[in-house]
Image (cartoon, rainbow, N blue to C red):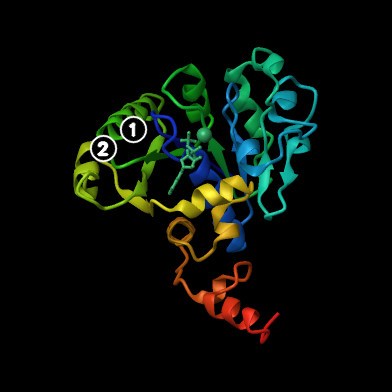
C-alpha cells in the first residue's frame, strides 16, 4: 500500500519544498522506495529546487488525461524519484485540481510513500492536495506568523479529515528570538517530529540544484532530515562520518592538499 503524505504550512517560504525533497531523499538513501510529487499546480517549485525545469511530461499532462501519471516520473541525479508539475503558465488553468486524488489512485502500489509538496496558503488548491493524501506533515518556522498559519493549515486538514501526524520546525536557531519548541507544541497541539536547524548548506544545495542531504550529508540540516526519515520509517539512525561518501571530510581534504589522498 502506498502512503500519500501532504507537506503543508499555511505560510510560504518556511521550507515545505525543502522538507519534501530532503525527507524523500533521506528515505531513499535508507533504501525506501519513495517519491516526491509536486502538488503545487499553480506555482510549482520542486523542479526549480532540483534544476530540471523542462521535464517533457508532467503531472499536468496526467491531469489532462494525456499520459499515465507514472509516465511523469523522473529519476533525479541525486537518486530521488520525482513527479514534477508543469512550469508553463498556459497549463495552469488547463487542469482541475479536484482531479488530483483520482490521478493519485494510479500511483497506488507504485512505491511505498509519496510526499506531496503543496502550495502555500489554505485555499481550495491546498485543500484538494490534502484531500488526496492519507496524512499530513506541517512545516513551520519558529516565529508567530508561521505558527499562526500552521494552525490554520492544521484546521484545514482537520476539516477534510486528514490526520496531521506532526510538525517540522525548520530554520531553528534556538536563540532568544525563536519561539520555544514547547510554545510551538502547545499552540499547535501536535507532536514536533523534527527540528531542522538554520543551515546555510540548504541554500548552497538549492544553488546547485540538489537536496542538501545529497550535497552535504554531514550538515546539521541533513542530519535532522535523516533522523526524521529514520523516525518515520521506524529505523534507528545514528549519524556517523561514514555517511559522508559524497562530501570529503576535513581530514580527507587536508590529506588531499598534502598530496596524500586523492
Ligand atoms: N533549514 C534551513 N536553513 C537555511 N535556509 C533554509 C532552510 N530551509 C529552507 N531554507 C531557505 O528557505 C527558502 C524557502 O524554502 P522552501 O522549501 O522553498 O519553502 P516553501 O516550499 O515552504 O515555500 C529556501 O530557498 C532556502 O533558501
Ligand atoms: Mg515550495
Q: CA distance from mark 2 to mark 1?
A: 8 Å
- Asked whether 89 or 154 is in front, the reply is 89
Residue of label 2: 188
- Asked whether 145 or 193 is in front, the reply is 145
Left or right: residue 121 compared with residue 181? right
Question: Is disc 2 in contact with disc 1, using a CB cutoff of under 8 Å?
Answer: yes
What residue is rendered at 55% in x and 57% in y?
Answer: 213
Q: Label 1 CB, ligand 1: below 8 Å?
A: no
For mark 2, give the secondary structure.
helix
What residue is rendered at 59% in x and 21% in y?
Answer: 42
Could you tell me residue 217's position as x and y percent? 54, 63
What residue is rendered at 67% in x and 55% in y?
Answer: 78
Q: Is residue 166 shown above or below 127?
A: below
Q: Earlier in the sequence, mark 2 or mark 1?
A: 1
Dot 1 alpha-carbon crowd within 10 angstroms: few under 14, some 14 to 19, many 20 or more: many
Q: Residue 150, labelled with which disc?
A: 1
Q: Residue 60, labelled with which disc?
A: none
Residue 1 appearing in the image? no
Amino acid at each position: 500500500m502506498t502512503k500519500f503524505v501532504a507537506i503543508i504550512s499555511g505560510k510560504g517560504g518556511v521550507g515545505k519544498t525543502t522538507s519534501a525533497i530532503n525527507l524523500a531523499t533521506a528515505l531513499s538513501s535508507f533504501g525506501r522506495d519513495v517519491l516526491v510529487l509536486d502538488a503545487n499546480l499553480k506555482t510549482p517549485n520542486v523542479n526549480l529546487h532540483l534544476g530540471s525545469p523542462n521535464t517533457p511530461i508532467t503531472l499536468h499532462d496526467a491531469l489532462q488525461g494525456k499520459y499515465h501519471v507514472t509516465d511523469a516520473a523522473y529519476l533525479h541525479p541525486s537518486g530521488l524519484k520525482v513527479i514534477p508539475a508543469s512550469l508553463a503558465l498556459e497549463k495552469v488553468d488547463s487542469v482541475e485540481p479536484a482531479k488530483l486524488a483520482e490521478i493519485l489512485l494510479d500511483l497506488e502500489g507504485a512505491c511505498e510513500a509519496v510526499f506531496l509538496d503543496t502550495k502555500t496558503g489554505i485555499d481550495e488548491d491546498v485543500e484538494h492536495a490534502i484531500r488526496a493524501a492519507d496524512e499530513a506533515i506541517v512545516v513551520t518556522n519558529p516565529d508567530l506568523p508561521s505558527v499562526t498559519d500552521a494552525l490554520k493549515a492544521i484546521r484545514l486538514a482537520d476539516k477534510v479529515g486528514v490526520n496531521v501526524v506532526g510538525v517540522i520546525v525548520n530554520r531553528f536557531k534556538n536563540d532568544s528570538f525563536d519561539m520555544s519548541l514547547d510554545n510551538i507544541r502547545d499552540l499547535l497541539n501536535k507532536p514536533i517530529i523534527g527540528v531542522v536547524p538554520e543551515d546555510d548548506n540548504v541554500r548552497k544545495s538549492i544553488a546547485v540544484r540538489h537536496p542538501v542531504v545529497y550535497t552535504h550529508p554531514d550538515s546539521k540540516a541533513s542530519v535532522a532530515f535523516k533522523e526524521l526519515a529514520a523516525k518515520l520509517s521506524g529505523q534507528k539512525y545514528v549519524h556517523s562520518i561514514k555517511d559522508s561518501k559524497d562530501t570529503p571530510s576535513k581530514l580527507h581534504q587536508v590529506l588531499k592538499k598534502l598530496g596524500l589522498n586523492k
